[in-house]
Amino acid sequence: METLNRGIACKQDEAAPLVSEEMYRAVVESSPDAMLILDDQFRIIFVNETVCRVSGFSREDYLQRNFMDFLSEENKALVVERYQKRQRGENPPSKYDISYLMKNGESRHAELKTSIFRNSEGKVWTICQMSDVTDLRRAQKALRKSEERLRRITDNMEDLVLQVNPEGIIEFISPSVKKVLDYNIADLIGHSVTSFIHEDDLARAMLVLKKGGKEGENKTEIRIRHRDGRFFWFEVIGAAIRNEKGKIAGAVVGGRDVTQRKEIEDHLRQSEETFRALTESTGVAIFVVQGEKFRYINKAFSDLSGYTMEDLRDLRFWDLIAPEMRDFVREQGLARQRGEEVVLNYEIKYLTKTGEKRIGDFAATFIRYEGRPAMIASISDTTERKKKEEELRASEERYRTIIENIEDGYFEVNLKGDLIDVSDPCLKITGTDRDGIIGMNFREFSPRENWPKIYQAFYKVFETGEPLRGLAWETVRPDGLRQFIEVSVTLKKNEAGQPVGFRGIVRDVTERKQREETIQWMAYHDILTGLPNRALFYDRAAMVLAQAKRKQWRFGLMMLDLDRFKDINDTYGHDAGDKLLVGVARCLEQAVREQDTVARIGGDEFVIILPEVSGREDVKMIGERIAEGFQKPISIGQKELTAAVSIGMALYPDDSGDIEGLMRRADEAMYETKVEGGGLHCA
């Protein structure tokens, strides 16, 4: 303490009153800063209690040890240099940052303040005051990195970001304004943002600027003027900037060009109007069911059933199905949802508003209605046809006259399935003549895999005596042509009431079947590229996820986005852009494995699910193969274009345990790749 007293005393004015040793000790020991005194050989001759508490060393560990022993290597040269300058009487900076070592080996940052004095022997000693600034420096470094990252994001993002003051004057705008609206940044800074907004949208825009911090009021769609005078639609989101008193001092606004989306929405509205016009003018009952509730019915449905949409609000779909058919219809719908092969068209019994039971041909498929899964179905009422069939059985001659003049074919077979009589339309449907078809067995028209189904159907008619309606299967005509037929069958009895065979009606439903298959295919595939669409992708992804969980497998997921695809559309036209997308789809199909699924989920966005991979390297290898495939130009008419893609990858379960999480991680990785210039990036 005597040493410290001498050091401090040298710093005091000679006229100052003497301070007791106890007061000096109390001041130094209670200091929150670490304090040391070094002699002219860098030896530590004093440390206060704070030094020991902060570093973990004891006083004995410090005293008579060289100060350099407690500094990081990168700081020693600087400390020595400044120490030597002070010894020579020079005046180097007395405050700077150093890294010091703690007893546990950790290195921490401190701000070092030094001052010198001469002891009683005239030697230069140094007083060191150290303040730990490790947390401060880390925070400053994190802040610099955050600011740099934010600057890179705003400099490279395609969306607009701008900052305005309370008067709406633009104080900052991202460089993307040049690409999006063709303005230079200098053209906009200092100008009112309202001068670039369509007058009809000003009220909504001002609401976002003034109430940007309130949820539900911080998002809207407005039109912003391009440099060439055109207006483009933007989806804008605002966030309030508040000062230290909590008052709004401005706003930050983000904007995304949604002009193309608005155009698509207009096209969709037109398509919906066309669909509604068609469904309202047809004689077939068409309706949409979501869950168990009716969401839409056409005029023909009301005419057939007697129900209006208002009547159906409190009724379920099953309430209109005859009780004896409800289980069958429900099971058909569930099987279709499970992806099982089911009869797409079958006969149904339904109830009208008056309680009358009627019969119709029922067909259904699944669609998305207002963003949610739904069933669209049709009923072609056949009640009157059934009555006619009953009348035909009452008079054979009348029956024969009628069936020879309808497009449906009439046939009779014995109990073995050999044809014994056919009508002329039946000859036309089967592509045979009368001499050739008589005596042929039904098996000769049908692929072997359909034999059990046909046998079981006819056997049920034989056992129950009840007619069969809507039995459909694929046949092969003698000329090799494949077609789909629909058959209605009744049991034929002799005068004694004993079964002797079957008679029925056959109808060529090939075109209808093809239309239904086309509709089904379109519901789950991208029309342009033929790849699975978003709905089919999620369906397959769910199966892969379930299998991976059950068998504890890994699988990968890739997100791909074409770089500068908008430039291709703008330069060569949308037709060329579409052809490029088709070429990209083919490249992706060639690059992946047979068990992989490639889907197009957006304009130039693709996603690939990779089952049964061993790890991240497998996913990366497939990604590199994809990237390599895109090195080859894609022919677009007379031109050849090279597609540039950004690829992001994620691995289950390492990156996420569900599909949405994997999509998000892969999308983030893809975005990082795009920011860095495109290529390949793992989450």
Image (cartoon, rainbow, N blue to C red):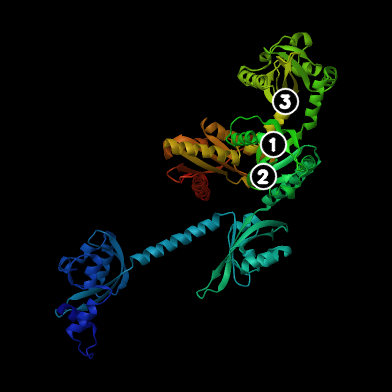
Question: Where residue 201 sits: x, y (%)?
Answer: 70, 63
Labels 2 and 1 touching (C-beta < 8 A): no
Labels 2 and 3 touching (C-beta < 8 A): no
Q: Earlier in the sequence, mark 2 or mark 1?
A: 2
Q: Earlier in the sequence, mark 3 or mark 1?
A: 1
Question: Where residue 357 sits: x, y (%)?
Answer: 74, 36
In depth, the one of 394 and 540 nearer the eye is 394
Q: Is residue 298 visible?
A: yes
Numbered disc 2: secondary structure: loop
Q: Amino acid at mark 2?
A: Arg
Numbered circle sitting on residue 316: 2
Q: Is residue 189 visible?
A: no
Q: Foreground mark, 3 or 1? A: 1
Which quadrant of the rendered structure holds the N terminus? Answer: bottom left
Question: Where residue 621 sits: x, y (%)?
Answer: 46, 36
Say if 235 sits above or below 291 in the image.
Answer: below
Q: Earlier in the sequence, mark 2 or mark 3?
A: 2
Numbered circle sitting on residue 510: 3
Specify the quadrant of the image occupied by residue 20: bottom left
Q: Which residue shows up at 67% across the image and 37% down it?
A: 323
Badge 2 density bin: few <14, some 14–19, many ≥20, Cα 10 Å: some
Q: Foreground mark, 2 or 1? A: 1
Q: Is residue 340 left or right of residue 612?
A: right
Numbered disc 1: secondary structure: loop
Say if 122 sits above or below 569 in the image.
Answer: below
Q: Amino acid at mark 1?
A: Ala
In depth, the one of 420 and 547 nearer the eye is 420
Tell me the residue that label 1 is attached to. 322
